[in-house]
Amino acid sequence: PGGGVGAHAPTAGRARERPPAEPRASPPLLARAAARGAWIHTVSGFVADEVRALHPEAAERVVVVPNGVSPLPVGPGTDEDRGRDLAGAGRYVLALGTVEPRKDLPSLVAAFDAVAVEHRDCNLVLAGQDGWGVDTLTRAVMRSPHRDRIVRLGWVDDAARAALLRGATVFAYPSLYEGFGLPPLEAMLAGTPVLTTTAGALPEVVGDAAVLVPPSDHDALGHALAELHRALGWTVIGI
């Protein structure tokens, strides 16, 4: 009788990770749904636990319905060669998604700097539309001694997205908080190694099929990138 509602990330009070308008909207909507007896569908067990902690009265009505991932498009302009053309390099680390603070892309820039000296044939590609807090990323890129090898593509269409995922040597997703996290699954679907964090639902989503590091730790991120380089047989091309 209470109907149903979906919950992707109920802890909207995280001001650093979420835009100012969101914290005022999401929790009251969820609270009203819980109060009226609605079933609450969450995209992960992590989000389900957060919802149960926020609304224990609705604990028995919280059901996990994980997201699925659609097949990547095939056809002209979706192959790995186009991805490398877009990246401007034969080898590249790819980050994909809307630019916002919780994606922690400045940490990825710092991690890339740590390995870029020894791997001069590798680029860092940041694909995704600008969201909020983009100035922090812009400053990080401008400070980087390897900024000429950091490619910011902005929004890309589905074909280019598929091409970039297929052509990438590593897909990096250094998020600070995720209720689910579809891009790492898309990268795995493309057969691309994934480096991500232990934040939120990410360990639940990627299981043992990705390299995991603590969030907000660019040193650990850089070390993991270097280890992946070695594991993948990348040749050191230094100065």
Image (spheres, rainbow, N blue to C red):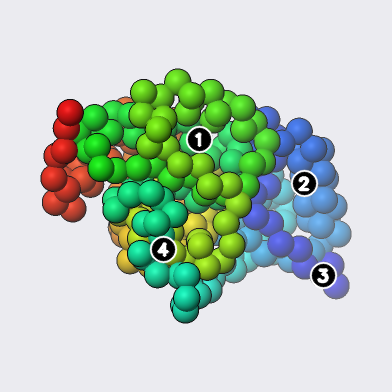
Residue type at mark 2: give it: Ser
Q: Measuring from the top left, give residue 163's x and y in whole percent.
A: 44, 64
Q: Contact, CB < 8 Å: mark 3 with mark 4?
A: no
Residue type at mark 1: give it: Asp
Q: Contact, CB < 8 Å: mark 2 with mark 3?
A: no
Residue under label 4: 82
Sequence order check: which comes first, mark 2 or mark 3?
A: 3
Label 2: few (<14), some or many (≥20) within 10 Å? some
Label 3: few (<14), some or many (≥20) within 10 Å? few
Residue at x 86%, y 59% (from the top left corner):
36
Sequence order check: which comes first, mark 3 or mark 1?
A: 3
Q: Nearer the viewer, mark 3 or mark 4?
A: 4
State the SS at label 1: loop
- In the rendered image, the residue lying farthest to the bottom is 75
Residue at x 35%, y 60% (from the top left corner):
167
Per the rendering, the mark at residue 3 is 3
Q: Nearer the viewer, mark 1 or mark 2?
A: 1
Q: Nearer the viewer, mark 2 or mark 4?
A: 4
Q: Is residue 215 left or right of residue 44?
A: left
Compute the Cα span from label 2 to label 3: 17 Å
Compute the Cα span from label 3 to label 1: 36 Å
State the SS at label 2: helix
Q: Is residue 214 visible?
A: no
Sequence order check: which comes first, mark 1 or mark 4?
A: 4
Q: Measuring from the top left, give residue 147's x and y in whole percent.
A: 41, 30
Residue under label 1: 104
Q: Relative to the observer, which residue lies in front, 1 or 157?
A: 157
Q: Relative to the observer, which residue lies in front, 34 or 185?
A: 185
Residue under label 2: 26
Q: Is residue 120 visible?
A: yes
